[in-house]
């Protein structure tokens, strides 16, 4: 599964919290996800979206907690997901919540 080429659009997102232990072997995709949503291009799609990284040294599993503007939440456990799968899940949720994104994707 390829990552979305258009980039990450965070219009419907209020807050993203990425938690991981950097010494675990299964955090690569979670760190790549953090890099993508924390990029200048993604952040410019919603300047009010708060992206937070919580680096822990407790051997915990990587977790991504996303809160949308309407109060809905999405919790992804990144240990067994690829970065592309996490981005795809985020984008599909964002498109479902943003009526303008639905219209532009149909064109």
Image (spheres, rainbow, N blue to C red):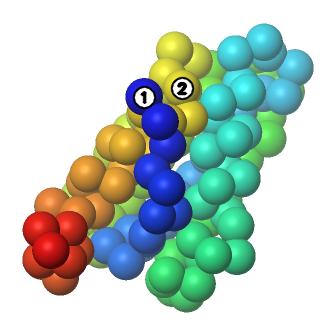
Crowd class of label 1 (few under 14; some 14 to 19; many from 20; radius 10 Å)? few
Label 2 residue SS: loop
The quadrant in which residue 26 appears is top right
How far apart marks 2 and 1 lie (CA) works out to 9 Å
Callout 2–callout 1 Cβ contact below 8 Å: yes
Q: Label 1: which residue?
A: 1
Crowd class of label 2 (few under 14; some 14 to 19; many from 20; radius 10 Å)? some
Work out whether 92 lies above or below 25. below
Work out whether 59 lies above or below 52. above
Residue 44 pos. (x, y %)? 58, 84
2 vs 1, front mark: 1
Relative side of 81 to 37, left or right: left
- Asked if residue 2 shows in the view, the reply is yes
The quadrant in which residue 37 appears is bottom right
Q: Nearer the viewer, residue 57 or 15?
A: 15
Residue 89 pos. (x, y %)? 33, 42
Number of marks drawn: 2
Q: Label 2: which residue?
A: 82
Residue 96 pos. (x, y %)? 15, 61
- Quarter of the image with the N terminus in it: top left
Label 1 residue SS: loop
Residue at screen point 84% across, 28% down: 22
Residue at screen point 79% across, 15% down: 24
Relative side of 51 to 94, left or right: right
Residue 84 pos. (x, y %)? 50, 36
Residue at screen point 15% across, 74% down: 107
Q: Which mark is residue 13?
A: none
Relative side of 21 to 90, left or right: right
């Amino acid at each position: 599964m390829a990552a979305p080429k258009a980039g990450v659009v965070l219009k419907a997102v209020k807050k993203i919290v990425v938690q991981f232990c950097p010494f675990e072997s299964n955090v690569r995709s979670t760190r790549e996800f953090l890099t993508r949503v924390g990029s200048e291009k993604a952040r410019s799609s919603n300047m009010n979206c708060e992206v937070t990284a919580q680096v822990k040294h407790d051997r915990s599993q990587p977790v991504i907690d996303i809160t949308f503007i309407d109060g809905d939440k999405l919790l992804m456990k990144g240990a067994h997901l690829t970065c592309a799968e996490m981005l795809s899940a985020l984008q599909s949720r964002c498109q479902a919540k943003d009526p303008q994104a639905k219209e532009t994707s149909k064109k």
